[in-house]
Image (cartoon, rainbow, N blue to C red):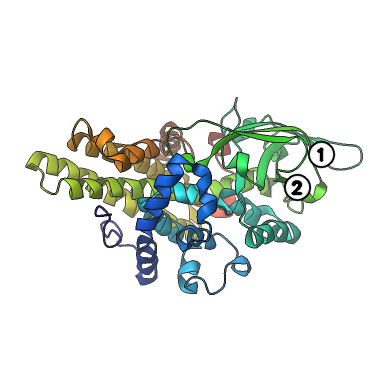
């Protein structure tokens, strides 16, 4: 595919060391095959099952697994270890999304729910969850968003009601859940008692009686299999309550916000990868542009480089134990915006029939508009930035991850 670049992008990547650059190059080498698979997933999202053996599908999830559950000898160990950091996930995700973000979103693996397990679960729960993922390809889900409340974590209406013989009954609904209807296991956030510490996270097997899921129609990122889930008297055993061994302030909401803040830079990385891919596509199909049009493209690429640099910096801060909620939200919002602007500009400069004549561009144009809705809209992130500015450069503006995790949960 002639529009694919030969190496990972460098503009804005000055924060990367040699190991991270090697990781970027490793993932960039997969781009051609990822794009082929992604085109097929757009037509049939369930076709991912035919590609589960391919390294381009298997590698991205390796870093999200604890070391003892990773594939041994299949991939360079130093690169898998690099991809286990937030910065490594961002670097790898950008390159994979340059190929096609649908492949990443459609593939089995831990994703968001795996982060909750890492943060909250006891040893038996970790073994049960990650043992299943390492034994067989397993789709997972993270169920926080609700039809009437969105992802306002403090306003959850899904309930966990105790039963006389022990355990609880789960009742309620979740909406816009990635892979929910085809997952085998996942995490559900629900309310056991009033107040922020009354919110719990439970590990749920989708074969449980009373669980049902349905696919929602989508225009872009079809590989994500966005779903609506319903729970009608689903029995939750004590062994499935995550974080029961922890104080209430360090379970439930803690698990949700902990992983959302760590995962959000990855959404920015997906948008950056797609934006860069669109610009490269234009330069291939119109290598010579009039000065004014060339300046507009240069402007978009400068914005991509800027948000790439900030995203890498935010990810590195998280790895160092500092979570700046406003900065995380800002890079996600900026990345989503530049991806939309890039595809819009490319469609314009390739002519009025570009979305008919260029099937890849038409698909990318649809896909990138999902990023605005993933992990909080721009309005929510702008509010977080505004509140941070009001507080000013106080010591509490940057807290270590464990203390910061539950702050501002109602905004998400």
Q: Are marks 1 and 2 in contact (CB under 8 Å)?
A: yes
Q: Crowding near pointer 1: few (<14 within 10 Å), some, many (20+)? A: many
The image quarter in which residue 182 lies = top right
Determine the secondary structure under disc 1: strand
Closest to the observer: 209 or 196? Answer: 209
Q: Residue at x 46, y 33 (%)?
A: 380
The residue to which callout 1 is attached is: 168
Q: Residue furthest right?
A: 165
Image position of 91 with respect to 366: above or below: below
Q: Crowding near pointer 2: few (<14 within 10 Å), some, many (20+)? A: many
* Residue 44: image location, x then y, percent: 48, 41
Image position of 139 with respect to 135: above or below: above
* Residue 218: image location, x then y, percent: 47, 32
Q: Residue at x 72, y 46 (%)?
A: 205
Closest to the observer: 88 or 234? Answer: 234
The image quarter in which residue 152 lies = top right
Determine the secondary structure under disc 2: strand
Q: Is residue 83 visible?
A: yes
* Residue 53: image location, x then y, percent: 52, 61
With 380 as the anchor, is 278 left or right in this view? Answer: left
Position of the C terminus by quadrant: top right
Q: Residue at x 61, y 35 (%)?
A: 153
With 125 as the anchor, is 64 left or right in this view? Answer: left
Q: Is residue 396 visible?
A: no
With 74 as the anchor, is 208 left or right in this view? Answer: right
Report the label total. Answer: 2
Image position of 149 with respect to 335: above or below: above
The residue to which callout 2 is attached is: 241
Q: Which tag, 1 or 2, sits closer to the chain's start?
A: 1
For the residues marked 1 and 2, what is the alpha-carbon distance in whole angstroms? 9 Å
Q: Residue furthest left?
A: 291
Position of the N terminus by quadrant: bottom left
């Amino acid at each position: 595919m002639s529009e694919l670049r030969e190496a990972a992008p460098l503009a804005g990547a000055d924060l990367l060391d040699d190991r991270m650059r090697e990781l970027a190059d490793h993932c960039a080498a997969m781009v051609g095959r990822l794009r082929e698979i992604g085109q097929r997933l757009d037509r049939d999202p369930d076709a991912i099952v035919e590609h589960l053996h391919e390294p381009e599908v298997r590698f991205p999830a390796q870093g999200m697994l604890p070391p003892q559950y990773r594939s041994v000898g299949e991939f360079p160990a130093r690169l898998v270890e690099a991809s286990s950091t937030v910065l490594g996930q961002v670097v790898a995700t950008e390159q994979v999304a340059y190929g096609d973000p649908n492949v990443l979103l459609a593939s089995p693996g831990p994703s968001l729910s795996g982060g909750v397990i890492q943060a909250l679960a006891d040893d038996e729960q970790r073994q049960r969850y990650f043992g299943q993922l390492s034994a067989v390809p397993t789709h997972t889900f993270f169920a926080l968003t609700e039809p009437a409340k969105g992802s306002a974590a403090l306003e959850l209406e899904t309930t966990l009601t105790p039963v006389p013989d022990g355990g609880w009954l789960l009742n309620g609904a979740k909406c816009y859940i990635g892979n929910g209807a085809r997952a085998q296991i996942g995490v559900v956030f629900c309310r056991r008692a009033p107040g922020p510490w009354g919110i719990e996270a439970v590990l749920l097997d989708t074969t449980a009686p009373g669980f049902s899921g349905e696919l929602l129609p989508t225009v872009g990122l079809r590989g994500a299999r966005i779903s609506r889930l319903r729970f009608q008297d689903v029995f939750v055993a004590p062994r499935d309550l995550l974080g029961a061994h922890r104080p209430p302030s360090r379970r439930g909401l803690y698990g949700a916000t902990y992983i959302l803040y760590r995962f959000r830079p990855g959404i920015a990385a997906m948008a950056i990868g797609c934006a860069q891919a669109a610009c490269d596509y234009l330069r291939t199909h119109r290598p010579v542009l009039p000065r004014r049009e060339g300046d507009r493209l240069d402007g978009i690429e400068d914005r991509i480089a800027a948000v790439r640099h900030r995203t890498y910096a935010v990810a590195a801060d998280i790895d160092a134990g500092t979570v700046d909620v406003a900065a995380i939200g800002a890079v996600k919002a900026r990345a989503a915006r530049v991806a939309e602007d890039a595809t819009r500009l490319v469609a314009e400069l390739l002519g009025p029939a570009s979305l008919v004549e260029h099937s890849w561009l038409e698909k990318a144009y649809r896909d990138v508009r999902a990023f605005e809705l993933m992990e909080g809209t721009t309005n929510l992130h702008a509010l977080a930035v505004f509140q941070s500015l009001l507080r000013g450069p106080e010591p509490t503006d940057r807290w270590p991850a464990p203390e910061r995790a539950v702050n501002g949960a109602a905004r998400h």
